[in-house]
Image (spheres, grey):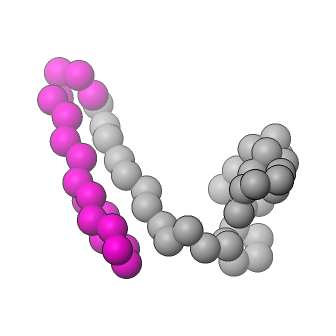
Amino acid sequence: MTHCAGFRAAAVARTEVAASLGIEAEPNLPLPAGVLAAVSRPREAAVLAGPGVR
């Protein structure tokens, strides 16, 4: 379950189908300095830094 401004979500799955299930939701704003490097691989960070991605 997640709660952030303007967004509410919950996810469910049968235990026979999924061992775990999660949702990560954050406002569509620039990340604080250093967060992207801490949570992504270098190639992912390069793709996200490309044109059209904020």
Q: Is residue 14 magenta?
A: yes
Q: Residue furthest front?
A: 52
**Quarter-wise, where is residue 28 in the image?**
bottom right
For image coordinates 50% across by 71% down, the residue present is 27
**Magenta stretch: dominant SS?**
loop
Say if 18 sits above or below 6 in the image: above
Q: Residue furthest top?
A: 16
Which quadrant of the figure contains the C terminus?
bottom right
Q: How many badges with numbers are in the image?
A: 0
Depth check: give the residue in front, 12 or 6.
6
For image coordinates 66% across by 56% down, the residue present is 39
- Residue 33 in the image: state x and y as whole percent: 76, 76
- Residue 51 in the image: state x and y as whole percent: 82, 53
For image coordinates 79% across by 45% down, the residue present is 47
- Residue 46 in the image: state x and y as whole percent: 84, 48
Residue 48 visible, this angle: yes
Residue 45 visible, this angle: no
Q: Is residue 45 magenta?
A: no
Give the extent of the magenta segment.
Answer: 1-18
Depth check: give the residue in front, 26 or 34.
26
From the viewer's perspective, tell me whether residue 46 is left or right of residue 13.
right
For image coordinates 43% across by 56% down, the residue present is 24
